[in-house]
Image: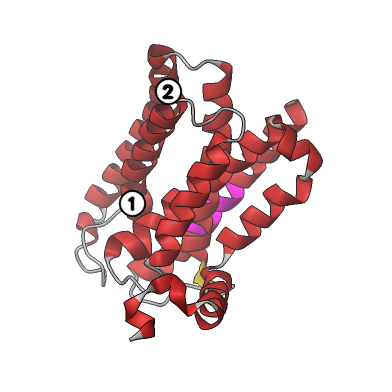
Amino acid sequence: MQQTENNFNFLRILFASLVVFSHAYALLGFEEPVIFNRSLGNLSVHGFFCISGYLICKSYMRNPGLLSFFVNRFLRIVPGLFVAMLFTYTVAKLCGGFENNPVRYISNGPAWTLTWEAVCYFGLFVIGSVGLLQDRHFLGFYAAVWLAFLININGVSDFYLVIAPMVLMFLAGVFVAVVEVDSVGNKFPWFAASGLVLVFDVNIFNYLYGAIVSNVPFLWGPTVTS
């Protein structure tokens, strides 16, 4: 367990460093570095959400009580967040609020994602409370969420392009945690790996979506059969 914790700590430090590096480009008005057709910052934030999904799910499974779950989340996040925000606020004041930057008055670019991470925590508690984290129930729920995402694959709203992928990455981490303790994880270890591969790059889903629609058009009714 200690080695596992060390590995997760390494990933957190790696993702945090990549987020800072990538967002420095964006806040200075330059394009962020791109890898696998995605910005480095985007990829790193999604990595955080995936790790959070796995670890928070494991924490809930160990102690699903309402008070203990949210107290643990508070103690895990708020003290460090307070120090980080105080530090960035101080730096921003000393630098005149970054008024002359191309993107002005922003000292902590990715901080807004914490709101949605908190939403994911609450959502995890809800689906855990209704029993969706037990046995194979989560697999059906996870598939339904992905189906909803794929049906709207051409969506252009901010929620679909920005928020939904973060939630899906969080659920990908939950998925790995669930199948790890379920018999499905023992019988089909590649099932969990394939799930992470599919959420890693939306281009994979674009390809699958095109293949399904072109070969089974009646799935989408009058819009493709008229």
Amino acid type of the residue that numbered disc 1 sits on in the rendered structure = Asn
Q: Residue furthest right?
A: 187
| Left or right for 63, reference 226 | right
Residue 34 left/right relative to 111: right
Marks 2 and 1, Cα distance to the nearest angstrom? 34 Å
> Where does the C terminus fall, quadrant-wise?
bottom left
In the rendered image, residue 74, in percent from the top left (x then y), is placed at 38, 24
Mark 2 vs mark 1: in front: 2
Above or below — where is 33 with respect to 141? below
Residue type, label 2: Ser
Q: Is residue 49 visible?
A: no
In the picture, the disc for residue 153 is: none
Q: Residue at x 48, y 56 (%)?
A: 146
Which mark identifies residue 129? 2
The residue at which mark 1 appears reads as: 108
- Residue 93 seen in render: yes
The image quadrant that residue 77 belongs to is top left
- In this orientation, which residue lies closer to the viewer: 79 or 8? 8
Residue at 41% x, 27% y: name it: 125
Residue placed furthest toward the bottom: 226
Comparing 130 with 27, the one in front is 130
Task: Indicate the position of residue 168 as horizontal and vertical percent values.
Answer: 47, 52
**Principal SS element in the magenta part?**
helix
Crowdedness near tag 1: few (<14), some (14–19) or many (≥20) residues, C-alpha within 10 Å: some
Q: Is residue 62 magenta?
A: no
Q: Residue at x 58, y 18 (%)?
A: 62
Q: Point out residue 170 in the picture as x, y percentages from the top left corner.
A: 49, 45
* Label 2 element class: helix
Which range is magenta? Answer: 13-19
